[in-house]
Image (tube, coloured by chain):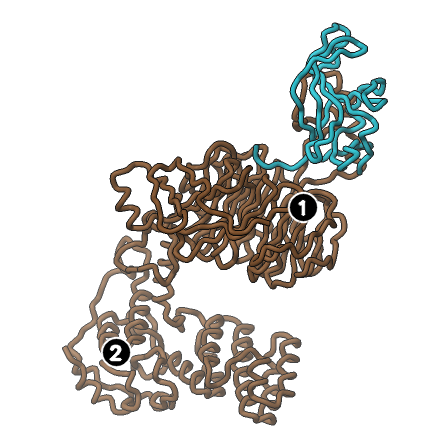
Amino acid sequence: MRFTELEESSPTNSSNPAVAGPSSKSHSTSNGRTVANGNGFVSPFTNGNGVVGSSGAGTSGSNGVVMERHEKSALSRVNLPGHLLYEDSNVDREEFVRLLLQSLRDVGYIESAATLEAESGFSMEEPQVRRFREYILSGMWSKAEDSLSRLGIVNEDNSWDAKFLINKQKYLELLEARKTAAALHVLRTELALSSPEPAQLHVLASLLMCTEPEDVRQRAGWDGVSGQSRQQLLLDLHRFIPPSVMIPQRRFLTLLQQARQDQLRRCIYHNTPLEATPFSLLSDHECNKDGFPGVTTTVLSVHTDEVWNVEWSHDGAYLASGSADRTAIIWNMGSDRRKWEVHLILGDHPFPVHSIAWSSDDSMLLTGAEHFIKLWDAKTGSCIRTMDEHTETVTALSWLPDGSGFISGALDRKIIQWNAEGRKKLSWGLTDIRVTDLAVTPDLSRVVTIGMHVPTSSESSSLRGIRNSGSSGDGTTNPSGNTSSMNGITPTKNRFIIYRLSTRQVESSIKLDGDLTSVKVSQDSQYALINHSPDEIQLWDLRLGRLARKFTGQRQGRHIIRSCFGGIDGSFVASGSEDGNVYVWHRDTGSLLEVLSGHGEGSVNSVAWNPANERMFASCSDDKSIRIWEAPTPEMVLDMSGHTDYSVSYSAKGKGKTRQMDGEVENAGMASPSTRL
Amino acid sequence: MGMSYRRYLHGERVYGCSKCKTHLATIHSMISRAFNGQHGRAYLFDVVVNVIEGEPCDRPMTTGNHTVRDIYCIKCGTTLGWKYDKAYEANQKYKEGKFILERNLLVDVQ
């Protein structure tokens, strides 16, 4: 069926190519939504794209002659029972059809839209809404303001707010066009009347001082008449106009995108960037495990004692490790990702190395060994500076994301801020806790600390009573000095304290039972991940100061076990464990995804996800080794098809690669130190 | 095995290693001041933390034969005293499982 002849019979609208096709057969629609123009005619509407400045419908008094042409249309309205799309659905048929109409018109299926309107008897929106849109987009401010009253705005405040937004745009456009006098008039007569707060008015008034249009745009955070500002104004106005009157733009697409996001959130193994994720409306999205780094591809075995910590450089090309053997090693991944080698061995530590931190530009590395901090040149391996300001173990080193320096935390209850050269800028004074770990949020707003709470003197002296009542015990020995309220040794109380970085004031201080050993902050600065003994990792929402989720499964009792966020959008949580396995969970559901074995006896002390490669992470263990975990390559999956053990080690000794099918094989000596300090 | 932090003690008086100030014991867990070590006066404690225990050996003392282990500071390795594993004299049994710290190797910390 074609409708082109009908288009020709619409003389008054010929200037508007977006308006085409037949109008609805029904003059007043069955659901009582009668058209407001009073003459009983329904006109077809568009979403306003491509009709800016159209004057065809601009003269509201002349609507009576518009589109008197439905006689030829053979389409009759289809009468359906009820108001739902399907009987057993909760989708309103009229809303659905209106969204379809909007989508059809947006893409240019004008005639189909008109046909749908005729068949369904529903129209996308009423003519005054379309005209309002046109007025805004073409800058016809007084008409726009006049028609506001016909858009079903429910309360007076909203009406004033909408007027304010329109007049603000008008004012800014006048300023941009250097019509200062006219702008001043708008400010005095219209903005002053409708402004919700005096402060906003002052800001606007201050723009009168701008001499250049660019100044106006920059200071107002507004992109000008030639930018998207009028479109943005329409979006902002949606807040005040009921959506049933003016459908938000691209509403159908918004709903589909929400469906997609929801599917991605529920896809527990999801680990591909958004742009590389195929999405079909025809089936739900679900990933298999192919993109998940569950296979050991390299074992780094150069340390001669337990490896306690690992940290990736920001570019993901280097890995630094700290060990009980009193060295830190910087490992280089090599360009083809298989030729791992020792880049530098940073010796010269008087104690085991337990903390590591890369500077934001990866040019320097900090190491912590007992109460010493050392700053190293990560290219040459020379020690730039040794700091011994702390008097007890330095447990945390964190560079500020802006590169201006770093923060250290220690068991001596001090938090110290340093500049990038390692000179002390500021000591925070004694905190309430012996800091066991600390992290700065990427947005630089907060410092998240965990540690052992130090009792006040009155709390301490009350211990005497405990001792007296309990000292005549059965004489059982307590060789490890385990937690006991007898003998003057109290159970350690632990706390999680959030500071504002700018003021160094405590924002919240939360008491937690059990030792706290590690804290990491998510990339969006919203969550903190805290290892907690026994056997629990907690995810805290920093803005709400509330526990969001717990991850369980890993073993943690006596040792410092660390965890991390990882994968695309930080959607995984990984942790070491005292049972020698690596545990990985899906962050948003808390499901335990993988328990990865491979490390030898002892604890897996720390894990670190490669920040530049969502399909790679590293783990380090008491077994003196570091394992690199990656997603299996297609070639590996093929090779391994006859084997049940997926724990493959790659030996990357010198040139060429030797694949060892036995996961137990360690590549001792595979990487030869290029520098020894 | 594995990494752990040293323990920290609270109380009116905390004794630490004179060399590195590592916390060792509190006055509340002290049982007696009437002991002598290799460097003079020594104290008997119920509980001592942050020490490594050496191998057991039999040692004749003024109060009879005992099986003891030397104890070392976990941070700096200084020998601080010993721990009683076994007392052969019945009236000395109360020392079993208890610790001797030499006064000259201790400092007040906090």
Choose mark 2 or mark 1, whichever is in front.
Answer: 1
Compute the Cα span from label 2 to label 1.
69 Å
- Where on the picture, by quarter, is residue A208? bottom right
Name the N-terminal-most of marks 2 and 1.
Answer: 2
Side of B9 relative to A243 (left or right): right
Foreground of the two, A225 or A573: A573
Q: Residue at x 48, y 53 (%)?
A: A332
Where A386 falls versus A159 (above or below)? above
Q: Chain of mark 2?
A: A
Query: Residue A531 placed where, x, y %?
Result: 56, 41
Return the mark for residue A110: 2
Residue A493 drawn at (x, y percent): 67, 37
Q: Is B4 rendered above or below residue A39?
A: above
Task: Tell me which residue sits at (57%, 35%) in the image.
Answer: B2
Q: Residue tagged by mark 1?
A: A394
Please provide percent x and percent y for residue A85. 27, 60
